[in-house]
């Protein structure tokens, strides 16, 4: 009897585990169309690493793309499908299963896809590719918004020898996936402790434009010169169709030097892709997120309705909706107040009504406490504003430290750059929301200006608070003249709803180079191994920026080593003879040195 009971318990556990595993997978990586080493080292090891993706690692599986896999699993049960196509076409078939049809199924089901293929665009659009399938062309053009340009070569064959050219891929500013992060390709990156190398050296890859940057935002660009990336150098793009999200790259993450760029790029992509999937736990949206009555005459009343919508996979349990702060009792919840737990299933709503009756001609601010079982959001405090009649409701008001909304960088010697701090201050009495803050890419010399930090909108600034933005002008260009740009700003401020901040900077001759080493930095040139050896004589808790420019002001190499390194080596064995300028931003101060390379 005891043996029977033990076997019964074991069978129950096995049944439970099988059911648990059958419910767990949310993400699938198809691993048979790409080089196994790339699959393992550039993708799988990060997808299953809780350090990079704690919310993804337990729920991801890998399988070959074939009939057997698609019979075993229902594809549209997965939240994200990852198609690593390697050197294959988009319409590749394995048995009766077509990659293109599988992606279409995911889109129709409102699910998400990450697609990476080195030759997808080459086969679809380039006459040398020999395919030019109209169905594939239409999908890439209409669904992914790709306007194909050319195959870009980053190598040269000289006799029996192939010379590879190093290059960078840089994320688009403000993009949730690209985040302006620089990735190093066809070259090693010296962290000061070790050198990162890419898994794959590229001979060539395809670049394209976006048909509509608003509908099809660029994610990553190939950097051509001086860290510029015009709209015709896109290698990564993303889009949304209904509730479906898609990311596509024409260059694989295996091209990136180092595990940090690879792992976090993949993590950001997965985080964005699954952003349209309901959270596993309880969650909710609230509308409006600020209750603002505006101006009401004392003794008179007005009401506003607030709606809570359950958006998570688990039921939302609302335990309390009541005032936490209510000066002079001028606010009241006249319907929908909760003191006993109310349960909402996903998609269900609860509405409560707030009444405001001011007593005096002053401003009032209250807050409503909302207690739920929402993950990471047990208590939420909803601000309630109101003004007694007879005073002027100022609302949000934006001021900057440049009253005329014009920033002049003055003269900047090439190939350096200059950063000016722009302060955005809310001098009003309500929360200021900046919904758009970006360099206007339609205006004149926009390529010369950017932000020296990652910006994400919307930006919220409370009354009497401020937000600082580092605006940068780059003089890394050959032409010496005045350059013009502007920042487009859109806010809810009454005085500045939509406006531009004008930018101006003048590029002049090369920076004067001091042949003597500074007390903080020592540079040695190893002519035998063709290396620059850089010693930092003091610690540095501000990120370093190390660049090497040629005589024309073109940035040849760019590094952002870790803080507090003591030693850095840069190889110049692949550079031609000539004069170069080593430029280092150390403790926010520039250090330059003339480097003569003779071979």
Image (cartoon, grey):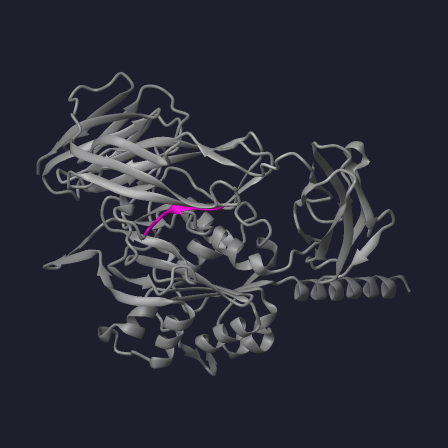
The answer to whether 433 appears left or right of 117 in the picture is right
Residue 251, image x, y percentages: 34, 59
| Quadrant of the rendering where the C terminus is positioned | top left
Instruction: Decide which of 94, 304 is in the foreground and name it.
Output: 304
Q: Quadrant of residue 454?
A: top left
The answer to whether 82 appears left or right of 206 in the picture is right
Chain part drawn in magenta: 435-441
Predominant SS of the magenta segment: strand
Residue 206, image x, y percentages: 28, 63
**Residue at horizontal 81 percent and vertical 36 percent from the top:** 329
Q: Is residue 592 visible?
A: yes
Q: Quadrant of residue 94?
A: bottom left
Instruction: Decide which of 434, 240 is in the foreground and name it.
Output: 434
| Quadrant of the rendering where the N terminus is positioned | bottom right
Where 448 falls versus 442 (above or below)? above
Q: Is residue 180 visible?
A: no
The answer to whether 364 appears left or right of 585 in the picture is right
């Amino acid at each position: 009897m005891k043996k029977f009971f033990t076997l019964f318990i074991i069978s129950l556990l096995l049944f439970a585990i099988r059911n648990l595993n059958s419910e767990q997978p949310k993400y699938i990586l198809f691993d048979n169309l790409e080089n196994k080493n790339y699959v393992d080292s550039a993708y799988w090891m990060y997808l299953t690493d809780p350090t990079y993706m704690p919310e993804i690692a337990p729920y991801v599986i890998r399988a070959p793309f074939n009939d057997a896999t698609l019979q075993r699993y229902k594809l549209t049960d997965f939240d994200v499908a990852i198609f690593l196509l390697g050197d294959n076409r988009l319409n590749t078939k394995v048995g009766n299963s077509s990659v293109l049809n599988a992606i279409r199924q995911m889109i129709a089901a409102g699910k998400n896809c990450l697609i990476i293929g080195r030759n997808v665009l080459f086969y679809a659009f380039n006459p040398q590719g020999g395919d030019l399938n109209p169905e594939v062309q239409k999908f890439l053009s209409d669904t992914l918004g790709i306007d194909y340009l050319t195959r870009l070569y980053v190598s040269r064959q000289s006799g029996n020898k192939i010379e590879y050219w190093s290059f960078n891929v840089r994320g688009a500013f403000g993009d949730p996936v690209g985040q302006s992060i620089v990735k190093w390709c066809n070259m090693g990156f010296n962290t000061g402790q070790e050198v990162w190398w890419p898994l794959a050296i590229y001979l060539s890859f395809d670049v394209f434009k976006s048909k509509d940057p608003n509908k099809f935002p660029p994610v990553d660009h190939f950097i051509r010169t001086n860290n510029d990336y015009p709209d015709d150098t896109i290698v990564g793009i993303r889009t949304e169709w209904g509730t479906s999200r898609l990311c596509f790259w024409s260059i694989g993450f295996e091209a990136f030097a180092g595990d940090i760029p690879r792992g976090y790029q993949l993590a950001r992509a997965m985080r964005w892709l699954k952003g349209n999937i309901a959270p596993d736990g309880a969650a909710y949206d609230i509308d409006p997120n600020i209750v603002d009555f505006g101006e009401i005459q004392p003794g008179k009343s007005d009401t506003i309705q607030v709606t809570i919508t359950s958006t998570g996979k688990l039921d939302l349990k609302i335990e309390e909706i009541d005032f936490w702060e209510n000066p002079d009792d001028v606010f009241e919840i006249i319907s929908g107040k909760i003191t006993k737990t109310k349960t909402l299933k996903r998609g269900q709503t609860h509405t409560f009504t707030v009444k405001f009756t001011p007593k005096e001609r002053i401003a009032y601010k209250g807050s409503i406490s909302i207690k739920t079982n929402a993950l990471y959001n047990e208590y939420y405090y909803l601000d309630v504003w109101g003004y007694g009649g007879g005073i002027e409701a100022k609302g949000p008001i934006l001021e900057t430290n440049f009253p005329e909304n014009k920033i002049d960088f003055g003269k900047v010697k090439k190939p350096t750059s200059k950063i000016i701090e722009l302060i955005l201050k809310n001098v009003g009495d309500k929360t200021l929301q900046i919904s758009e803050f970006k360099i206007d890419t339609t205006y004149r010399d926009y390529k010369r200006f950017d932000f020296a930090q990652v910006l994400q909108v919307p930006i919220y600034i409370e009354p009497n608070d401020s937000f600082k933005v580092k605006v940068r002008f780059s003089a890394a260009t050959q032409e010496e003249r005045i350059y013009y740009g502007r920042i487009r700003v859109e806010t809810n401020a009454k005085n500045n709803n939509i406006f531009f901040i004008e930018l101006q900077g003048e590029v002049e001759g090369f920076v004067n180079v001091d042949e003597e080493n500074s007390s903080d930095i020592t540079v040695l040139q190893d002519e035998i191994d063709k290396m620059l050896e850089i010693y930092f004589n003091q610690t540095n808790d501000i990120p370093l920026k190390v660049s090497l420019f040629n005589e024309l002001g073109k940035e040849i190499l760019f590094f952002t080593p870790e803080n507090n390194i003591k030693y850095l080596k840069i190889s110049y064995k692949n550079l031609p003879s000539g004069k170069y300028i080593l430029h280092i931003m150390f403790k926010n101060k520039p250090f330059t040195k003339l480097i003569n390379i003779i071979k």
